[in-house]
Amino acid sequence: MIIDMLKQHNEKEKASFHMPGHKKGAGFCGAPFNSEIFSLDTTELPGTDALIAPEGAILKAEEHAATLYGAKHSFFLVNGSTGGILSMIYSAFQPGDKVIIDRNCHQSVLNGIILSGLSPIYLAPEATTLADVPGTVSAKNIEALLTEQPDIRGAVITSPNYYGATANIKEIAKLLHKRDALLLVDEAHGAHFSFSKALPDSAVSQGADMSVVSLHKTLPAPNQTALLNIGQSISVDRARSAVRMFQTSSPSYVLLAAMEYALHFAEKNGEKETERILPLLQALNCPTLDDPFKLLPSWAEKGISGYRAEEILREKFGIYIELCNTHRILCMTSWGNTEDDTRRLGEAMTYLDALPQQGDPITYQAKNEISVSVPVITPAEATRLPHKLVSLQKAEGKICAQAVSAFPPCIPVLLPGETVTREKLEYLYELKKNQATITGLTEDMITIIP
């Protein structure tokens, strides 16, 4: 629909005197990424519809996406899942609302809390059977919180998480809905779930009121492409108003067409592509959680850290993985992976398996996470109060004024309004030692409230 609309418009247009500045791709002549696709990149004109208020091909594409995910409506997002998460939090809650937040949330959830003026109650996820791999929040702990604090207005959870663990969305949705509270799901890593019986169900089809999926993470779609899926109990108009606040008014039509293509591909080929790739992945004998596309191998017993394994895969085999930690690596796979890809990964894993013992086995000591925590002051208050930079050595016991996150997976180590603890500082030192990318620090300085 969208690509046909753009091709028809392109045939009519003989000269471009509008955005974008590349003028139907002419500005890319001689550029290394020159492609015919850029000739289709246009703006809101008669016959090209408008993402901000779609009535034609874009609206039809959104409505079709909704049928795929079991939603009342789906919004095309070109600002990534971040824009969708900000939109759903802002549209669902009022300033001051108490909301349960998965403590291992993406940093965009925190920004949504700040912008919406919420009072978060952080709930730590459950552990998994795999060392150094967190799970998701449990229905049991959410039920306990709802019993203790009946004025809670909802929950924002992550499912699946970065490692492929999924929450019991059906049960959590039931618990919240009994108390007229809402369930919002950061489903960024689950865009592929709706397209195979071998995968979990989508969040909205299980009762979530809203969810956001990142098409670019697992579908054949470019970065920045995502969907906001709306459940039956939510006002589409209210959600649309929020999307307009957080999404650019100048979307790339190439991204819109690419999203439509990715969904068409998934609908047509998702089942058979899953049937093709799963045996290849299972033959690698890697640990997985609920999403079989997330491989979590470890050589910690041989004294090989995830950081060292990542280095070997990259330098010796040309394999680049999603992330690593002290104990293991995470290999994100998709329908785009070939038999040659899995063969190469298998050879690399065999090589690591055959290495002699590299030292003492790397043991895992679970972090002593507090199950439920409430910041000393709200994140919104923390970001607005006077603050200053101090060295990490002098930060213990102070109130953090700015989120400190490790990338990937952009999960905050410290949140605004939280007390800086010795345990958190030691974790930051470990991340720095292993050259992780950390946002929220200025060299070895952290922002605190004096």
Image: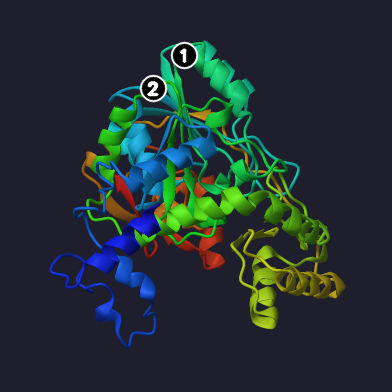
Q: Is residue 200 left or right of residue 115?
A: right
Which amino acid type is marked by label 1? Gln
Percent x, y for residue 344? 74, 74
Which amino acid type is marked by label 2? Lys
Percent x, y for residue 276? 75, 58
Residue 252: name its quadrant.
Answer: bottom left
Q: Earlier in the sequence, mark 2 or mark 1?
A: 2
Q: Where residue 365 is drawn, which disc sits there?
A: none
Q: Is residue 308 left or right of residue 441?
A: right
| Residue in the foreground of this view, choosing between 180 and 203 | 203
- Counting labels gives 2
| Residue in the foreground of this view, choosing between 117 and 27 | 27
User: Image point 43% across, 49% down: which residue?
Assistant: 226
Question: Where 37 falls versus 138 (above or below)?
Answer: below
User: Image point 69% across, 76% down: which residue?
Assistant: 312
The answer to whether any part of residue 188 appears in the image is: yes
User: Image point 44% across, 54% down: which residue?
Assistant: 259
Question: Where 24 falls versus 325 (above or below)?
Answer: below
Q: Where residue 98 is drawn, which disc sits there?
A: 2
User: Image point 78% across, 66% down: which residue?
Assistant: 303
At label 1, counting other C-alpha atoms closer than 10 Å, the crowd grade (few under 14, some 14-19, many 20 or more) is few
Element type where label 1 sits in the image: loop
* Callout 2–callout 1 Cβ contact below 8 Å: yes
| Residue in the foreground of this view, choosing between 243 and 49 | 49
At label 2, counting other C-alpha atoms closer than 10 Å, the crowd grade (few under 14, some 14-19, many 20 or more) is many
Percent x, y for residue 80? 40, 52
Question: Where 388 falls versus 159 (above or below)?
Answer: below
The answer to whether any part of residue 379 appears in the image is: no
Percent x, y for residue 59? 35, 42
Q: Which residue is mark 1?
A: 149
Question: Where 338 falls versus 420 (above or below)?
Answer: below
* Distance (Cα) linking label 2 and label 1: 9 Å
